Each structure stands twice: as C-alpha cells, then as structure tokens.
Image (cartoon, rainbow, N blue to C red):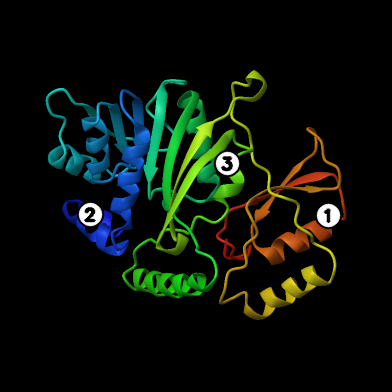
Amino acid sequence: MRKLELEPDTYDEKFTVLTKGANTKVKDWILGQIGTSKEILEVGCGSGALAAQIALNGNDVLAIDKNSQMVNSARKNYPSKDNMKLAYQVGTITDLPADEVSKDVVVTTFMLSELRTFEQQIFLRNVWKILKSNGRIFIAAEFVPSGFWKLIFKIKRWWYKKKLRRLRLPSTSIVKWFYQYIEPLGFKMVTERKWRHGSIRAMELKKVEKNGKTEPGYYQPPQKRFKGLRSQLQIYKCIFTGQSDHFPIEPGIYKSGEPDRKSPIIVTVNYVFTYVKVMRALKSIDAWVLCVDSRGINVWCA
C-alpha cells in the first residue's frame, strides 16, 4: 500500500487489482452498516472515495490521512458538494482531530497493517476516547488465513516483501495479535465479515463502558515461559538460524517474580533468545520486563 500511495491518482485502481476487488466489497459492506445522520471520523482516508460515499448518505464526515499527497488528491477527486458535510485534513493516529465523546462512528480501512503492535493499541485507545457511548468502529485489514490458504498467503507475502526490498520501499505488516486487544482496551465484537479465504476481514466493534469508567483499558500479553525444554530448544533455534530469520514474542510488559507499582522496569527487545536470557538472568527478581517491538530481531541488531 505504501508503494501505491506514491501515485495518489491511480491508488484506487491499483489497490483494487491488488486485492482482486475485495476492497470494493469491504466498502459496500461498511456503507450498508453505518446508516445515516452520524458524526463520523475516517482514519487513513486514502483517495477519499469511501469518505465521499459516507457523506453522500447523509453523514457528517471528517476524513484524515497522514499523507498530505493523498489528502490533496482526495480534495481534488472527491470534493465536498452542495449539502454534503465532508472535510479532509492531514492527521495521525496519535493526535485524532476530534473532541472526547464526539463521534458516533470511526472508520478505518487497510490502515492497521501500517501500524506496529503498540501503535495499534494506541490507536484503539484514542478511538475509545473520542467515541460517544456505544459508539462503533469499523475496521478492515489484511490477516493471515487459516488452513491450506495460510501457506499460499505466506508464499505470496514473502515474494511481495522481497520485491519491495529490491525497490528499497517500506513494507506493511500482517495484523497478528489485534484480536487480543479488543476486549482489554474496552471494545466488543459486534460482527465480522471475511473475503478471500479470510485474508481480508472487516469487523464492527462497539465501545464498552464498564462500571462507569471514563478511560480505555490496557492490554498485557500472557506470560511466556522461559524455563524448561521448550524454551531451551527455542534458544538453539535462534542460535542456528536466528541470523537469517526473525523469532518474535508478543511485544508488551511481562512479570519477573511478583512486581508491584514500585518495582523497576527492565527494557529489552521482543526477540525470543533475548527474552529468555534476560528472564533467566533476573532469577525471579521482582521487576517488570518491557519487550519493545524490535520486529523480532536480536538485541544487537535492534
């Protein structure tokens, strides 16, 4: 997608070819779910095609994108017409241009893959803050399918990333742990649709306010074992193949011993070898171990 953004005027056409038309099915599904007369923020609006359609259906739409070229292209190709409430501006996930509890709906399509793990959580927390009570977010993204199609998907993905490396262009990431963030951060899955054997999915999440809380929650990954035969085999695997492959664990904060609010925080990378070595060296000292997202590469490269 980042490569396509270099040519905003042909973005829609080339992206439709890339997804074999699944992106248009996603947009049609979202349009059918949203309804009318809503205050809506679209994050990562791209060409502006979806934002314009949502506005034509009688909604008040603010569409943002961090790429100023895409925003300018959207203003040119899909301008706000008479009786349309549609505005475009440059914006990012860390500073959403909306007041707290001001939007009925947030929409984002094929933007999550451009965010790293912690960025996805930051985005969901910021969306929770600007949504009204029982507000909804519609998300579409690329995921890894299951079964036989998982192998085909990974082969295609490997070839595509190899091509991008040759052209020295940045690549997007597979949305891997996103489902685990939904409930802890304060959302509930309402419905989900899948296309292309599950590699492209769209979902509707609803904001949940438990016990009158006014802040979104936090996500903490499940504790990962660092002792025993399995952990030792992972160490050997990293030693023998770790220079040519990545072995990530889920980024996040882990426990050593029984830490509390006053315990120190040890910062390291989300590389299996490093995590296991650090946890063993701590010998259950009470501390928090923060594994930052180093893309699963070792501590020296990170």
Helix, strand or loop at label 3? It is loop
Percent from the top left, x then y, of residue 263? Answer: 80, 38
- Using residue 287 as the reference point, say whether residue 191 is left or right of it: left
Quarter occupied by the N terminus: bottom left
Helix, strand or loop at label 2? It is helix
Q: Is residue 60 above or below residue 144?
A: above
Earlier sequence position, callout 2 versus callout 1: 2
Which residue appears at 12% of the width and 24% of the height?
A: 82
Earlier sequence position, callout 3 versus callout 2: 2
Residue 43 visible in the current orientation: no
Which residue appears at 79% of the width and 57% of the height?
A: 279
Amino acid type at image mark 2? Tyr
Percent from the top left, x then y, of residue 254? Answer: 74, 48
> Is 30 in front, or is 246?
30
Residue 182's tag is 3
Residue underneath mark 2 = 11
Which residue appears at 57% of the width and 48% of the height?
A: 179
Helix, strand or loop at label 1? It is helix
Residue 25 visible in the current orientation: yes
Amino acid type at image mark 1? Leu
Quarter occupied by the C terminus: bottom right
> Mark 2: few, some, or many residues within 10 Å (few <14, many ≥20)?
some
Residue underneath mark 1 = 282
Q: Are marks 2 and 1 in contact (CB under 8 Å)?
A: no
Earlier sequence position, callout 3 versus callout 1: 3
Which residue appears at 41% of the width and 25% of the height?
A: 104
> Is 101 in front, or is 264?
101
Q: Are marks 3 and 2 in contact (CB under 8 Å)?
A: no
